Image: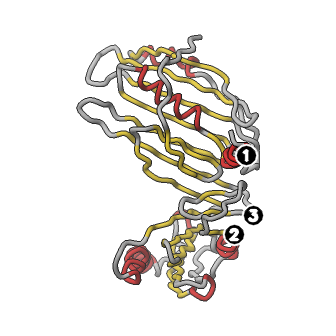
Amino acid sequence: MQHTTTSQPPLPVTLYPVGRFLFPVPQGLEFQGRIININDMSIEETDWNSGDRAKQFRALWEPVRDEARKHYDVYKNTPVVRGGFVQEDVSEHFGHPAVLLCYSAQNGAHWIDTFVALPDWILRIKEETAYEIGKECLGDLKGTTLDFYRHYHTDRSALPADLFWTGRGWVQGLKTRDESVDAFALRTKTETTPEISLSLMAFTIFRPDEPTKSIAAIRKIFKAHGAELKILRSRQLFFAGRPGLEEAFVLSPKESGEHATEFSGKWTIEGEPRNPERPRIVIRMECKTDDHREALRIWDAVLENFTSIQEWHAKMRGGR
């Protein structure tokens, strides 16, 4: 099996905290954002703009309310559909202006959707919860939402090593059963450079993980569809003592066209069941280019700089 390397030094990167990890974005790519989920709650943080903050706050939650209300008005007389609608002021629970919306979700569940106007940004905690069939929304503020908020911090002056980074804020000491994070970066296509997409996924698993199969296992499938697979690298690459498979390959269709050849890099790290601190991790990069040397250089910058926040803190303390 080939283990292609590049003689050029890796590109510098910018590290973006995402959950328990630091997502390395190589020079030339732009960070696109994060998706954070903890214990069936999705966490969003929106910066304030200049101007009327009360108006900005309403502009964030009122469209959600209006859409939910519209849905409720259509289905409120259908007894077999779980539905409802509630809007409540829950500011007293958060010490800041806060609005709770309860409305119908998919598959008969309800959303408990809470917006909090913090001094530096707007926090949104959206949790899906089950209701009895046909039961109207109660508008009850979930204990899990409040528990999350009690462990949520905004001070960046003394960040601990064991934090979970939501983006603008961070969480410490929260007992979690399930975590998932996604992060994305992109280099847009120009006349001289191809588009590059980079992504990170990390998520809690609930049964023993299986070793990742090599892309070589489906080489015949690509060939049957008129594509040639060239594996540049396939190797075991460990992360924090956990096994992982790193592969870089080029896929070329028989019929050539503009940027028909695509470079792909993938590093899959095995997780431990029911252990949010040791999730399954998948890092991917794709680039439609005929020059896989540049793509490998960018990919190597990701591999060499991906780390956990705890490991990064340990290196900083050790001065390495």
Amino acid type at circle 3 is Gly
SS assignment at label 3: loop
Find residue 91 and report its horizontal and vertical position in percent: 57, 86
List the single residue furthest toward the top. Answer: 1
Q: Is residue 295 above or below residue 168?
A: above
Residue that appears at 60% across and 39% down: 306
Quadrant location of the C terminus in the rendered image: top right
User: Residue 141 falls in which quadrant of the image?
Assistant: bottom right
Find residue 267 and report its horizontal and vertical position in percent: 59, 31
Residue underneath mark 1: 314
Amino acid type at circle 2 is His
Q: Is residue 255 above or below residue 193?
A: above
Name the foreground residue: 155 vs 271: 155
Q: Which sits earlier in the primary sequence, circle 3 or circle 1?
A: 3
Residue underneath mark 3: 173
Q: Which sits earlier in the primary sequence, circle 2 or circle 3?
A: 2
Which labelled disc corresponds to residue 151? 2
Q: Nearer the viewer, mark 3 or mark 1?
A: 1
Q: Nearer the viewer, mark 1 or mark 2?
A: 1
Amino acid type at circle 1 is Ala
Q: CA distance from mark 1 to mark 2?
A: 23 Å
SS assignment at label 2: loop
Using residue 269 as the reference point, say whether residue 28 is left or right of it.
Answer: left
Q: CA distance from mark 3 to mark 1?
A: 19 Å
Label 2 with label 3: CB-CB less than 8 Å: yes
